[in-house]
């Protein structure tokens, strides 16, 4: 049986392939250069052709969320963390609203620099950040934390949108309206002085 060339996907980061799951996982132990390892084999359908997909543990964990008959888009992506470029398998479920699968993600080649270019492209009028470098870094790091928390499932446009959302929240907190306490004015009542005649006094 022909197989899905995962090596080619790794060499062409960001390239996508659309597949339909056609079986559950089959555990297989293999040996290469004297070292043993395991894979999980799946039967998948691509363009009405049955292929074999050999998944690693990390890829299997994501495929566990799918059932036989489900369609998904598979790609090998990279991201920057702690100044280092890292990689992961991205598996996105195909829905009726999903469009342009083959062009849905372009590879990220230079980390934050390309991200910044994407941000400027999507927002022609760029807000000037206060304390620009530190502010940008803080917002970017918070957005990256959310990205990692959600298993790196965002594409570039979604990342930019969430970066802007975090930025808006920061700006909203910085520009809070200070409500002045309304002090109730207490009306002073006039003091009425009672007049006494000398005969009314007790002394």
Image: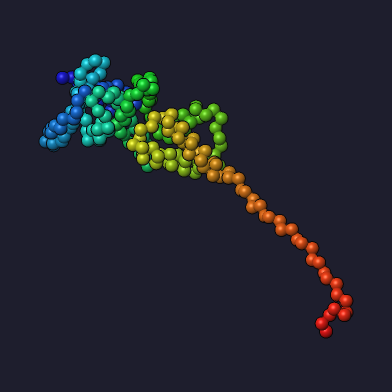
Which residue occupies 38% across, 19% down?
A: 100
Residue 11 point in image, percent of width and height: 29, 26
Query: What's the residue at 71%, 58% (across, down)?
Result: 186
Examine the rendering and report whether any part of residue 125 can be seen: yes
Q: Where 130 sits versus 159, above or below?
A: below
Q: Residue at x 52, y 38 (%)?
A: 168
Q: Is residue 32 visible?
A: no
Where residue 189 sits in the image (x, y, percent)?
Answer: 76, 62
Residue 154 x/y as whole percent: 38, 32
Residue sitting nearer the eye, 153 or 68: 68
Instruction: Tell me the quarter of the picture where residue 53 sits.
Output: top left
Q: Quadrant of residue 21?
A: top left
Q: In screen coordinates, is 199 left or right of 44?
A: right
State which quarter of the image contains the N terminus. top left
**How is the protein colored in the picture?**
rainbow
Measured as percent of width and height from the top left, residue 42 is found at: 19, 26
Outermost residue on the top side: it is 48
Quadrant placement of the C terminus? bottom right
Extreme residue in the bottom direction: 203
Question: Position of 132 compared to 61: left or right?
Answer: right
Residue closest to the eye, 77 or 71: 71
Residue at 82% in and 82% down: 202
């Amino acid at each position: 049986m022909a197989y899905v060339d995962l090596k080619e996907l790794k060499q062409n980061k960001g390239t996508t392939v659309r597949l339909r799951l056609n079986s559950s996982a089959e555990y297989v132990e293999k040996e290469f250069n004297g070292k043993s390892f395991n894979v999980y084999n799946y039967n998948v359908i691509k363009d009405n052709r049955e292929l074999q997909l050999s998944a690693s543990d990390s890829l299997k964990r994501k495929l566990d969320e799918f059932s036989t008959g489900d369609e998904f888009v598979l790609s090998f992506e990279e991201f920057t963390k702690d100044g280092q470029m890292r990689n992961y398998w991205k598996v996105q479920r195909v829905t009726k609203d999903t469009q342009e699968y083959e062009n849905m993600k372009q590879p990220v080649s230079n980390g934050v620099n390309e991200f910044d270019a994407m941000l400027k492209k999507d927002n022609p009028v760029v807000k000037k950040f206060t304390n620009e470098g530190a502010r940008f870094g803080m917002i970017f790091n918070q957005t990256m934390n959310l990205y990692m928390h959600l298993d790196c499932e965002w594409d570039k446009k979604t990342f930019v949108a969430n970066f802007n959302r975090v930025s808006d929240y920061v700006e909203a907190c910085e520009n809070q309206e200070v409500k002045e306490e309304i002090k109730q004015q207490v009306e002073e009542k006039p003091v009425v002085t009672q007049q006494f005649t000398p005969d009314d006094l007790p002394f």
